Image (tube, rainbow, N blue to C red):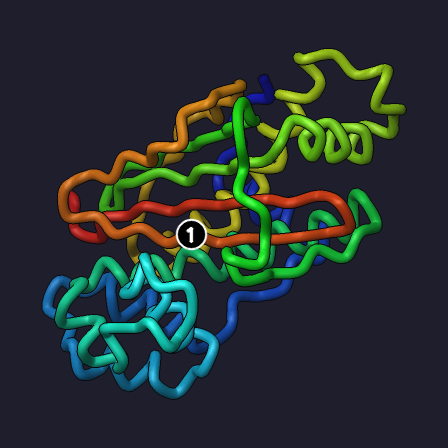
């Protein structure tokens, strides 16, 4: 497994792959959440001005709804009041994760990865690839990367420049670990810039048939989904903003 880069190496990875800067609204939201005395009204105003953030927050606040018609929480203010500040932090983390993942696919695999609604993809079934990275400090939580074995092999082949038949289990795991490193490094940089320092654990990658995602007390959960040709990727983020 590749060694874990430090924050300067993460920023170099971002420059190398041309990862877009975090949007101003997301950077502002991260800075607000980083304050222990942050004002809920201030958080609500930032999110309401960004339709993308608003839509994602309402999806987080209505985890069992198939679409907007089934939402029981319908406003940003209500979502924050019911789900806490941690739900806002998930938005601040999910954006740089998504930017890094999409750009990495474009640069390393020449594929256009699209962010899609979770319900647009077929659910994983049976044994699948699971990668995870934990982080701890002023923010604690995990990032989970799930995909079918076929998707994992296709991604590894593209990253390593090999034919799928030439790949062994170690190469596939290492490629998934590198993908996790690039993704999480981008959100770590965003958090650290806002004063929410945290340390990342080395990535863990393997096969599993367990679909349960553990959530630490005080944490929220956001589920993201992506698609490129036949490749489907599921990303789950859990975070507690005031763990210390």
Q: Name the quadrant containing residue 137.
A: top left
How packed is label 1: few (under 14 Cα within 10 Å), some, or many (20 or more)? Answer: some
Write down the residue under mark 1.
Answer: 223
Instruction: Give coordinates of residue 168: x percent, y percent.
Output: 74, 12
Q: Position of residue 204 (x, y in %)?
A: 47, 22
The quadrant the C terminus occupies is top left
Expressed as whole percent of the image width and height from the top left, the position of residue 48 reads 34, 85
Residue found at x 46% / y 23%: 209
Q: Residue at x 57, y 49 (%)?
A: 11
Residue 207 vertical placement versus 180 (above, below) = above
| Left or right side of 33 for 144 | right
Nearer to me, 1 or 3: 1
Given residues 112 and 147, the one toward you in this image is 147
Name the residue: 23% across, 73% down.
72
Residue sitting farthest toward the left: 37
Residue positioned 42% across, 52% down in the render: 223
Rendered image quadrant of residue 176: top right
């Amino acid at each position: 497994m590749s060694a874990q880069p430090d924050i300067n190496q993460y920023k170099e990875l971002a420059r190398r792959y041309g990862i877009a800067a975090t949007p101003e609204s997301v950077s502002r939201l991260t800075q607000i959440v980083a304050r222990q005395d942050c004002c809920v009204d201030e958080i609500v105003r930032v999110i309401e001005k960004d339709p993308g953030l608003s839509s994602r927050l309402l999806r987080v606040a209505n985890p069992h709804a198939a679409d907007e018609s089934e939402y029981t929480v319908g406003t940003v203010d209500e979502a924050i009041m019911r789900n806490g500040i941690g739900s806002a932090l998930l938005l601040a983390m999910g954006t740089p994760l998504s930017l890094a993942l999409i750009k990495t696919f474009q640069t390393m695999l020449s594929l256009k990865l699209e962010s899609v609604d979770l319900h647009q993809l077929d659910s994983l079934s049976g044994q699948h690839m699971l990668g995870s990275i934990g982080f701890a400090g002023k923010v604690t939580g995990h990032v989970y990367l799930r995909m079918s074995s076929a998707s994992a092999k296709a991604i590894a082949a593209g990253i390593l420049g090999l034919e799928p038949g030439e790949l062994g289990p170690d190469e596939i795991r290492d490629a998934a670990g590198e993908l996790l490193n690039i993704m999480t490094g981008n959100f770590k940089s965003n958090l650290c810039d806002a004063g929410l320092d945290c340390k990342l654990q080395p990535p863990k990658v393997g096969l599993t048939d367990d679909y349960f995602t553990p959530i630490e007390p005080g944490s929220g959960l956001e589920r993201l989904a992506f698609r490129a040709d036949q490749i489907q990727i599921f990303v789950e983020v859990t975070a507690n903003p005031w763990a210390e």
